[in-house]
C-alpha cells in the first residue's frame, strides 16, 4: 500500500474510533426504573439549596456515561446517562414512615445535581414509590440533556458523591450528517485603522459566545470587538446557537494561537514580583509571583547580585524550576507562585529572581525594586492629592472673592435689596435729624429704596403729612418692605401722649373704638403713630412695622410699641439687614452671598456708627459717598 493511501486509511480509522467514543441511544423517556420501583418521574428543580432525600432507599453507587441521545435518526445531541444503584431498606433500617406512606408502598425521592461550566448548578428531582415486596437491589437510570454540550466538563453529584465527566470535542465525535453537530465557526477580521479585531461567524442568528484561556476552564462572556492590544495568543472562543427549542453544541476555536504579535501582548502584560519571608521553622524563603493574561511556558531561578555596579546577577545553582503547570485563574488574569527555601549568597546581599519566558530573560527582579515601586506609587498619589488640594483651595478662594465682590455692601442699585420707610421724631434736637439722615443715607447706599420726609420736604408740604405717609406706606407694603420707627426720648414721650389721648377719646365715646382715633396729625411721625395704632387693631403691626434704636441708653418702651421687633444697633445690625432684604435665595451660593453681604454690611455699619460724629450729612438731598474698596482677607 502506497504512503498516501496508507495515510488516508489511518485517518479514516481514527475518525471511526473517535466517533465510536459516544454511543447512540434511542431515548424516548428521561427516566427508567427497575421492576421493583413504580411511578418513577424526574423533574428539574429551581431550588437554590438541593432538596433533602427521603424514603427507604440507600444509594450504593452511581455511574455516568456520555452518549448521543437520539429522538429521531438525524436528531441526536450529547447527553449523560446516570445509572444509580439503590438498596431497599427494611423496616428495621428506617427510622419512620413519611407522611405520604400508604399501606404496602413507600414514597422516596433523590436529588441529582450537575454543573456544566460556565453554567450554574442545576438539580434533577427523582421521585418514585417502593413496594413492600421489592427486592433489595434496584436501579434507576436518568438522562440529562440540559446544559450538556460537546467539549464541556460536567460535575455530577448524587448523595454527596461527585464525579467529573469530560465530553469529547465536537470534531472527534459528531457525525457530519447530524444537524445538531453543525456548530458555528468563528473567524477573525483585523482592522488596523481602528485598532480592533472583530469576531464573526457564518450565521449570526441567536449566536452566543464566551472566551476562555487555552488550557484553562473558565469561559466568560465576550464582546465581538476586541482592541488589538488586549488580544493574546491563548484566547479561545466557544460559540453556540441559542434557539427557542434547544441549544446547539459548542464549537471551540483559538484564532490567534499561531500569531507572534499576539504572543508578544501576553509577555508585555506579564507582571513579576519577589518578596522575602521565613518559614514556620525560621528558614529564609524567597517568594516569587508571576501573573499574565495567559498560561506561559517559563523558567525561574534565584540569582546573586554582584557587588560591583553592572556586574549582573549570577544564578544560584540547584534551584532552577519550570513553571508550565500550577497556574490558577480568575476573570482578569492567570497567576502562579512559588518559593525557594534556604537560598544562600556569598556577599550578604539578598537574592533576586530571574525569569525566562518564550526564550527571553527578564530580571533580575528584587524585593527592593518592588518596594521602591510602591514608594513611588505612594509618593505620586500624595503629590496628586496635594495638587488637587491646591487647585481646590485656589478655586474656592476665587469663588469666595467673586462672591465678596458681588456682595459689596456699598454702591448697590437703589431698590435692589428692598423698600424701607424711615419714620422719626426729631423734636427739639437737631442732631437727631442728622443721625436719621446719616442712617437713611447708609441704607440707600446698601441698595435699599429709602423713603424719608427730610428728603421730600417739598412734596410733604404740598400733599400734607398724612397723605404722603399713606402713599409711602402703601408702596412699601406692596413691595414687601418695612416701616422703621427710630426710637428716641421724644418718640417715646409722644407715643405715650398719643396713647393717653386715644384712651380718653375712647372713654368719651363709651368704649367705641374708631379706626382713625386721632384726627389731629400735625406731622409725619404723628400720622405714623396713628397708622401703627390702626394696624395693631387689625393685627398686622408686627408684619409691617419695626423699631430701631441707634443709641445704647435704656428707654421705657410705651404700650403702643409693645410686640414690635426691636433692633438695637450696632449689635443687631446683621439681623436687621437680613430681615429688610426682600429676596428669597434658593441655592447654596445665593444663601452664602446673602450671608457675606449682611456680614460685611453690618461690620461697616458698626464702624460708621462709631465714627458718625465725623460723618454728618445734609438732609436736603440724597448724598453719595465715594466708593471705598475693602481689602479681601479670606
Image (cartoon, rainbow, N blue to C red):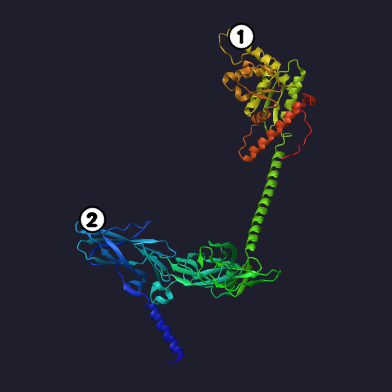
Task: Please identify the residue farthest to the front as the structure is shown.
Answer: 281
Q: Quadrant of residue 593?
A: top right
Task: Please identify the residue farthest to the right as the structure is shown.
Answer: 614
Q: Position of residue 469 (x, y in %)?
A: 67, 21
In the rendered image, the vertical position of residue 45 relative to residue 214, given as above or below: above
- Which is more N-terminal, label 1 or label 2? 2
Q: Nearer the viewer, residue 462 or 364?
A: 364
Q: Nearer the viewer, residue 292 or 590?
A: 292
The quadrant of the rendering that contains the N terminus is bottom left
Can residue 570 be seen here? The reply is yes
Q: Position of residue 244 (x, y in %)?
A: 39, 64
Point 61% across, 14% down: residue: 517
Identify the element where label 1 is drawn: helix
Point 69% across, 71% down: residue: 311
Query: Residue 531 vs residue 604: left or right?
Result: left
Point 65% across, 26% down: residue: 482
Q: Disc 2 vs disc 1: which is toward the camera? A: 2
Q: Position of residue 560 (x, y in %)?
A: 62, 17
Can residue 247 be seen here? The reply is no
Q: Position of residue 194 (x, y in %)?
A: 60, 67
Badge number at residue 101: 2
Identify the element where label 2 is drawn: loop
For disc 1, the neighbor class at 10 Å (few under 14, some 14 to 19, many from 20) is few
Query: Residue 55 vs residue 11: left or right?
Result: left
In the rendered image, the vertical position of residue 399 relative to residue 363, given as above or below: above
Q: Nearer the viewer, residue 105 or 195?
A: 105
The quadrant of the rendering that contains the C terminus is top right
Amino acid at each position: 500500500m502506497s504512503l498516501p493511501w496508507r495515510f488516508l486509511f489511518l485517518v479514516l480509522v481514527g475518525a471511526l474510533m473517535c466517533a465510536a467514543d459516544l454511543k447512540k441511544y434511542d431515548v424516548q423517556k428521561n427516566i427508567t426504573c427497575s421492576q421493583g420501583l413504580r411511578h418513577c418521574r424526574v423533574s428539574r428543580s429551581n431550588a437554590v439549596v438541593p432538596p433533602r432525600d427521603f424514603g427507604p432507599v440507600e444509594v450504593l453507587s452511581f455511574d455516568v456515561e456520555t452518549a448521543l441521545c437520539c429522538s429521531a435518526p438525524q436528531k441526536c445531541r450529547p447527553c449523560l446517562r446516570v445509572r444509580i444503584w439503590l438498596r431497599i431498606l427494611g423496616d428495621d433500617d428506617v427510622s419512620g414512615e413519611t407522611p405520604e406512606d400508604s399501606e404496602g408502598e413507600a414514597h422516596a425521592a433523590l436529588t441529582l445535581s450537575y454543573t456544566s461550566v460556565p453554567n450554574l448548578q442545576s438539580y434533577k428531582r427523582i421521585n418514585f414509590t417502593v413496594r413492600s415486596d421489592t427486592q433489595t437491589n434496584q436501579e434507576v437510570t436518568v438522562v440529562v440533556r440540559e446544559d450538556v454540550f460537546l467539549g464541556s466538563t460536567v460535575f455530577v453529584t448524587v448523595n454527596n458523591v461527585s464525579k467529573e465527566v469530560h465530553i469529547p470535542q465536537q470534531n472527534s465525535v459528531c457525525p457530519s450528517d447530524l444537524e445538531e453537530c453543525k456548530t458555528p465557526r468563528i473567524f477573525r477580521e483585523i482592522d488596523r485603522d481602528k485598532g480592533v479585531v472583530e469576531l464573526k461567524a457564518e450565521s449570526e442568528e441567536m449566536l452566543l459566545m464566551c472566551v476562555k484561556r487555552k488550557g484553562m476552564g473558565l469561559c466568560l462572556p465576550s464582546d465581538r470587538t476586541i482592541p488589538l492590544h488586549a488580544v493574546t495568543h491563548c484566547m479561545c472562543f466557544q460559540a453556540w446557537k441559542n434557539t427557542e427549542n434547544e441549544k446547539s453544541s459548542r464549537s471551540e476555536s483559538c484564532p490567534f494561537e499561531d500569531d507572534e504579535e499576539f504572543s508578544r501582548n501576553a509577555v508585555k502584560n506579564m507582571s513579576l514580583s519577589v518578596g522575602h519571608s521565613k518559614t514556620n521553622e525560621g528558614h529564609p524563603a524567597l517568594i516569587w509571583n508571576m501573573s499574565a493574561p495567559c498560561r506561559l511556558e517559563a523558567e525561574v531561578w534565584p540569582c546573586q547580585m554582584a557587588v560591583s555596579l553592572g556586574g549582573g546577577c549570577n544564578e544560584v545553582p540547584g534551584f532552577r524550576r519550570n513553571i508550565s503547570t500550577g497556574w490558577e485563574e480568575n476573570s482578569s488574569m492567570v497567576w502562579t507562585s512559588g518559593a525557594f527555601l534556604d537560598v544562600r549568597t556569598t556577599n550578604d546581599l539578598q537574592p533576586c529572581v530571574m525569569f525566562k519566558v518564550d526564550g527571553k530573560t527578564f530580571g533580575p527582579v528584587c524585593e527592593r525594586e518592588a518596594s521602591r515601586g510602591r514608594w513611588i506609587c505612594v509618593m505620586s498619589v500624595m503629590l496628586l492629592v496635594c495638587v488637587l488640594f491646591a487647585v481646590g483651595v485656589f478655586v474656592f478662594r476665587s469663588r469666595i472673592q467673586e462672591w465678596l465682590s458681588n456682595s459689596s455692601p456699598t454702591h448697590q442699585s437703589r431698590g435692589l435689596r428692598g423698600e424701607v420707610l424711615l419714620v422719626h421724631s426729631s423734636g427739639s434736637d437737631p442732631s437727631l435729624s442728622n443721625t436719621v439722615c446719616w442712617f437713611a443715607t447708609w441704607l440707600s447706599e446698601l441698595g435699599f429704596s429709602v423713603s424719608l420726609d427730610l428728603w421730600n420736604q417739598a412734596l410733604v408740604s404740598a400733599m400734607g403729612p398724612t397723605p404722603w405717609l399713606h402713599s409711602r406706606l402703601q408702596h412699601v407694603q406692596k413691595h414687601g418692605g418695612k416701616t422703621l420707627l427710630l426710637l428716641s426720648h421724644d418718640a417715646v414721650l409722644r407715643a405715650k401722649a398719643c396713647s393717653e389721648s386715644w384712651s380718653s377719646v375712647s372713654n368719651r365715646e363709651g368704649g367705641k373704638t374708631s379706626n382713625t382715633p386721632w384726627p389731629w396729625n400735625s406731622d409725619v411721625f404723628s400720622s405714623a403713630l396713628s397708622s401703627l395704632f390702626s394696624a395693631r387693631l387689625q393685627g398686622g403691626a408686627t408684619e409691617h412695622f419695626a423699631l430701631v434704636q441707634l443709641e445704647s441708653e435704656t428707654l421705657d418702651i410705651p404700650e403702643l410699641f409693645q410686640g414690635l421687633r426691636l433692633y438695637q444697633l450696632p449689635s443687631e445690625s446683621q439681623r436687621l439687614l437680613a430681615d429688610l432684604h426682600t429676596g428669597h435665595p434658593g441655592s447654596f451660593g445665593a444663601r452664602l452671598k446673602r450671608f457675606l453681604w449682611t456680614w460685611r454690611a453690618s461690620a461697616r455699619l458698626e464702624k460708621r456708627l462709631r465714627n458718625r460724629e465725623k460723618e454728618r450729612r445734609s438732609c436736603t438731598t440724597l448724598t453719595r459717598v465715594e466708593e471705598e474698596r475693602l481689602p479681601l482677607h479670606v
